Amino acid sequence: MTIPFIKRSLGLFWGLQLAGIMSVAINPIMPLLLAVVLSGVVFLLFFQQPLLIILANEGFVKRTLQAWFPIFESVDPIIVLVILIVFTLVLRLRAPAVRRHLASQQTVVLAYLIWVVWMLVASTYAPNVEWALDKSLRFALYNSILFLGPMILIHTRRESRIMLTFYLLYGFCVALLVYSQLWFLFGVDPAIGSTTRFTVLSANPIGVARVLAICAAIASIMIISGKASKPWLWSIALVFFAAALVLTGSRGPALSFLVATVILGMFIGKAARRRTLLIIASILGIAGLILLIVPEGVSYRYRLLLTTPLTVTKQGIRPFSSILHRLQMWGMALALWTQDIRHFIVGDGTAGFAKLFPWRDYSYPHNLPFEILAEYGVLGASIFSLHFIEGAKRVLKHVRNRFKFEELMWLTGLVTFFISTLMSGDLDHNRFFWFFIGGLVSTCSIKD
């Protein structure tokens, strides 16, 4: 830590303290707000990694801040966050070592930027240019920051571990909030019997479940691989995250956790396969026990897997479930893609799937590959695949030499999230996907 850095920190500290004393005359709680700002700024002087995790959940963060602080009704907190992240990344790029590390990944970055440009080009022939530009520009801003951010903030193994630690801490806080809601409802709310899904405040349960699924998958792979220095601690973490995941009632993320654990467990080697089967059996047993203990409403969504609910439609009584609805949406996406040669090659344009639903009650088919084919065709899918192919080349080259636990954790997060994108989410809002791609590629590019 350099002397100028210490001087800047002290100057900021005393400046805010003076401002706090003067602000008492304006508002009695102003010193408290300044203290929070001071703590946050000083923290971010040392750790910038949480900013990316917050940005990946911009919808939830924005709604929460607007509910708690009315000032954010007029000031968009996400714009402030983006400015802060860009400022931080630019400062990090002043270091020659960071620039050299980023330059070593230029082929992956270039392939990604080609895809972003193609999204904008595809907006020009989309059915609704306004919808298309909104989707393209949001992707170009938010996902690019999440993709490039880890490549800039991670150029040593220590920085990679710090980023992963913050993600696990984020998952820990999410799980605690899920458990606290359960405890609160059991204690004071008679509506617990009708509750079917637990989440965090007003967040989409699927987003919450995805975070928990990734954390649970990381814990399970650390145990299976034998790379954990404290297996007992990771075992506790696995039960902690998996149980919270079950309570969210989101079956897609739960399935992605199980499938990713099996795939990576088999990938690690023969010695880990027995541990993989043991982990899966244990998790299924714990999940079954939880569903027997919790109120009937919480287990309702899982029991639907064994039955097919009926609903009244214009055509009469028809079977309906979220699984059947997903299959219907996938069929619509494939029909849009294959309706003629033009759609087969270049698709219907960015946000083109949303034209099937004029009220935008549904705007994506809940499957990332089908969404890309429907809106960008085989040409767009090929362009989209470029940065994955370039990243995979780097990862596979790295695997031949060594594969340490940081790379394994990033790979686990990426595989788990990718499986989840096959069942929910859209191109723009699957933001942690690009966060994990950037983190894995950056970690595999570290020279040590």
Image (cartoon, rainbow, N blue to C red):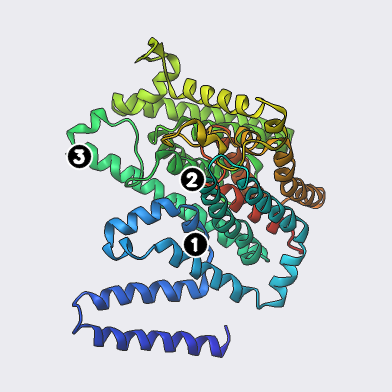
Badge 3 marks a residue whose secondary structure is helix
* Residue holding disc 2: 211
Quarter of the rendering containing residue 241? top left
* Side of 193 where 140 appears, left or right: right
Badge 1 marks a residue whose secondary structure is helix
Q: Residues within 10 Å of mark 2 (few under 14, many from 20)?
A: many
Quarter of the rendering containing residue 87? bottom right
> Quarter holding the N terminus?
bottom right
**Three-letter amino acid code at the position of disc 2:** Val
* Residue holding disc 3: 187
Provide residue 239's location: percent of width, then percent of height: 46, 39
Q: Residues within 10 Å of mark 3 (few under 14, many from 20)?
A: few
* Residue holding disc 1: 50
* Side of 211 where 89 appears, left or right: right
Looking at this view, is 366 or 392 the one in front? 366
Q: Is residue 78 above or below residue 192?
A: below
Q: Does the residue at mark 1 contact the one at mark 2 (Cβ under 8 Å)?
A: no
Q: Residue at x 73, y 33 (%)?
A: 270
Q: Which dot, 1 or 3, sits closer to the camera?
A: 1
Q: Residue at x 35, y 84 (%)?
A: 16
Q: Does the residue at mark 1 contact the one at mark 3 (Cβ under 8 Å)?
A: no
Mark sitting on residue 102: none
For marks 1 and 2 on the same chain, the one whose residue lies earlier in the sequence: 1
**Three-letter amino acid code at the position of disc 3:** Gly
* Side of 188 where 259 appears, left or right: right
